[in-house]
Image (cartoon, coloured by chain):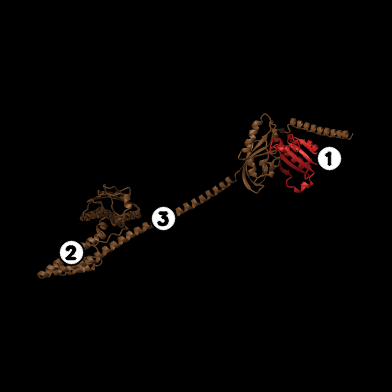
Chain colours: A red, B brown
Amino acid sequence: MKLREFPAKRKSAKAACVFDLRLYVAGQTEKSVMALANLKRICEAHLAGQYRIEIIDLVRAPQLAAVDQIFALPTLVRRLPEPIKKIIGDLSNEERVLVGLEVQRVRG
Amino acid sequence: MATKTTTRAALFAEMAELRKRLVESEEIFRAIRAGEVDALIVDGAEGQRIFTLQGVDSESNRFRGEILAQVGDAVCAVDLDHRITFYNAAAESLYGLNAAEVMGRYLTELYDCRSSSLDHATPRESGRSRTEYTIRTRDGRELQVESNETSLRDKAGRLIGMLSVTRDITDRKQAETALRESEKQLRSFTGQLEELVKVRTVELMESQARLRGLAKELNLAEQYERKRLAGELHDYLAQLLVLCRLNLGQVKRMGLPGKTNEIVKETEEVLNQALQYSRTLMAELSPSVLLEHGLPAGLTWLGEQMQRRGLMVTVDVATGADWWLPEDRAILLFQSVRELLMNVLKHAGSKEATVRLEQGGGKLQITVRDDGVGFHCAALVAVSSNTAMSSKLGLLSIRERMMSLGGWFDLQSVPEQGTMATLVLPLANLGGRDGQTKGEEYEVSLSSAVPHSPASRVLRSTAIRVLLVDDHAMVRQGLRSVLESYPDVESAPMPAARTLG
């Protein structure tokens, strides 16, 4: 279930965004909340104006887990740029997130 | 070959997919072991189901989470960066933003704080704090809130964030303000009312004082008028009657025929009655015994007068006291006693009454008591018949006049047990006797001689000389004409003196 897109106010950013991210969460569990907070912080720090986050709460719509074959929560899916990449966990390790999202490679 | 090639390509692709899945699976296991995930999705007969991974203390945590989710106050937890990590339903309605919108966002994005910095939202190392402040929500509502903040710590005791429980106190604050305002208004109204009551009380007292002053003046005016009428009666009517009688005496001495003499005698009798009546009237209007001999004598005379009307009055005067009073006060007391005795005569159904005159404690007290039918004092207020109304007004008049002189009047009565009326007059500030003008002495002095007068000594051997002393020329003239009929009597007027001391 699509809940919210970040950054919400930047409508024009949607067209220009490079990173299309989807965060699967399990309601307001500690790790889910932490993952969202970490993701926003990392994106603002490294991808400002180039990203879009779509949050999907599988507690409300568990059937959506099949779309990206999600097995554990929270899970971040990089849908764009291709190929699709997944980062599992609360995203507390910023370095691992940046490597997983291939931020340097995409920018470079 | 093509099939074999395709098969090989498919195998490579399958291997790549398997490697990818393996990496993903290893990543999942790593994340689970590292404690970075707290929920798993399991395919079952009913579709995907989500299971959360929690520690052994998870049940109590879950309960705590549910309790926090259900409480009526807005509960919001933030991490050390002020990012929201918990947000319950009450917080959704307070801030006007749902949980999905705000999770992971900064606390400062919930509202603008109007009345203080965001210090209250900063996780602190120590303790709890309670603050009140004003916020403006994103949908434009301005609210006054009260927030209780508590530090959040992990199992190791490290500070990991802050929990705030916030309550909307806008209505309460408005009610408090309104209450303060109305209390202020009430105090103001009370003050105004007290001031008004004070002013009205002063006005009322002034008005009462004026009324008492008027009552006193009315009383004095009445006394003056009574005295004037008595004076008129004495100076003119009584003198004329005396003159008529003197003249008639002269006529009698002339020797008249039988029938005429009879008529003259009858006329003389009528004149005597008229003279007697005018004297009674004079005494009623301004009792000379009161003015000349004081209150005890006046009351005794009054008792005798009442006895003629059928009421036996015993006047009991305490001995050893000075009963001198200024004329106006003496007259007032006299009239009040007369009014009370008249009431006994008219209403008490008793043939006897007692008047006691006494002094003590700087006061003069007169008690008028009867053993008549009595009455309910409360019933006196409601009387409506003319006679009773007249008596009621009389009693009211006594009370007012006594109060105008600084005294008081008390009336006690019990049905079938008689009535007792008490008049009390303070004796202080009565003024001195010197200032008192003594009542005029109306006296006809028929003196045969003035013993120590040199003139009388000279004339004694030759003729009887009569010095006529009276304050009325008409009477002097009448007496002179009577005396002139006696050859051995010589009369002489004494115009300069009015009385002989």
Q: Which residue is mark 2?
A: B272
Mark 2: which secondary structure? helix
Q: Distance from label 2 to label 3 (Cα)?
A: 55 Å
Gap between marks 1 and 2 measured at Cα: 156 Å
* Mark 2 crowdedness (10 Å alpha carbons): few <14, some 14-19, many ≥20: some
Q: Residue at x 60, y 46 (%)?
A: B170
Per the image, the residue denoted by label 3 is: B204
Q: Are marks 1 and 3 on the same chain?
A: no
Other-residue count near label 1 (Cα within 10 Å), few / some / many at <14 / 14–19 / ≥20: few
Query: Relative to B478, is A11 above or below?
Result: above
* Quadrant in which residue B66 is drawn: top right
Q: Are marks 2 and 3 on the same chain?
A: yes
Q: At which x and y percent is residue A53? A: 75, 42
On the image, the x and y values in percent for residue A27 come to: 69, 37
What's the distance in space between the residues labelled 1 and 3, CA to CA?
102 Å
Residue at 42% over, 56% down:
B203
Mark 1 — residue?
A105
